[in-house]
Image: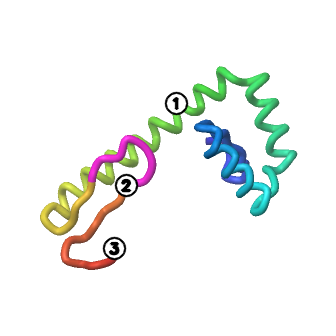
Amino acid sequence: ILSSGLRVGCLTGPQPLIRRAILHMQTSTVHASTLSQILIFEIMNKWFEGFMERVEGVVKFYKSQRDSMLASADKWLTGLAEWHCPAAGMLWIKIKDVPDT
């Protein structure tokens, strides 16, 4: 949403899941970049409304991209492939009669 280089996220869930995720982070990436964490903190503290407007713009852009892809799939792939409209995330297309697409 801000930049592809800012790798910071949040995790919520049941405590057993959180503990497992923390163990994984400690053995794989240790922690997110300190600079990225400080940058995100400052953005949230000083520019939250602007950030939320940015998020809305990004959502609108990717929804448009998704809708274009679905329209193209409907036009060109009906009968050849299967897909479902995603609420979020990636659009997966499975080509019929091909074992591993």
Q: Crowding near pointer 1: few (<14 within 10 Å), some, many (20+)?
A: few
Residue toward you, 16 or 18: 16
Residue toward you, 21 or 69: 21
Mark 2 residue element: loop
The residue at the far front in this view is 16
Residue appearing at x 42%, y 53% in the figure: 90
Count of number-bearing discs: 3
Instruction: Please give the label number shown on residue 78.
Output: none
Q: Is residue 87 left or right of residue 70?
A: right
Q: Amino acid at mark 2?
A: Leu
Question: With respect to residue 39, does 48 lie above or below?
Answer: above
Q: Earlier in the sequence, mark 1 or mark 3?
A: 1
Q: Earlier in the sequence, mark 2 or mark 3?
A: 2
Q: Is residue 88 left or right of residue 97?
A: right
Which residue is label 2 attached to? 91
Residue 68 percent coordinates (x, y): 32, 49
Which residue is label 3 attached to? 101
Residue toward you, 11 or 95: 11
Residue appearing at x 67%, y 39% in the figure: 10
In the picture, the quarter occupied by the C terminus is: bottom left
Which one is in front in this view, the residue at disc 1 or the one at disc 2? 2
Residue appearing at x 27%, y 79% in the figure: 99
Extent of the magenta region: 84-91
Residue 90 falls within the magenta-colored stretch: yes
Query: In this figure, which colouring scheme has been used for the structure?
Result: rainbow
Q: Amino acid at mark 3?
A: Thr
Question: With respect to residue 32, does 42 lie above or below?
Answer: above
**Spatial distance from mark 1 to mark 2, Cα to Cα?**
20 Å
Residue 19 falls within the magenta-colored stretch: no
Main SS category, magenta section:
loop
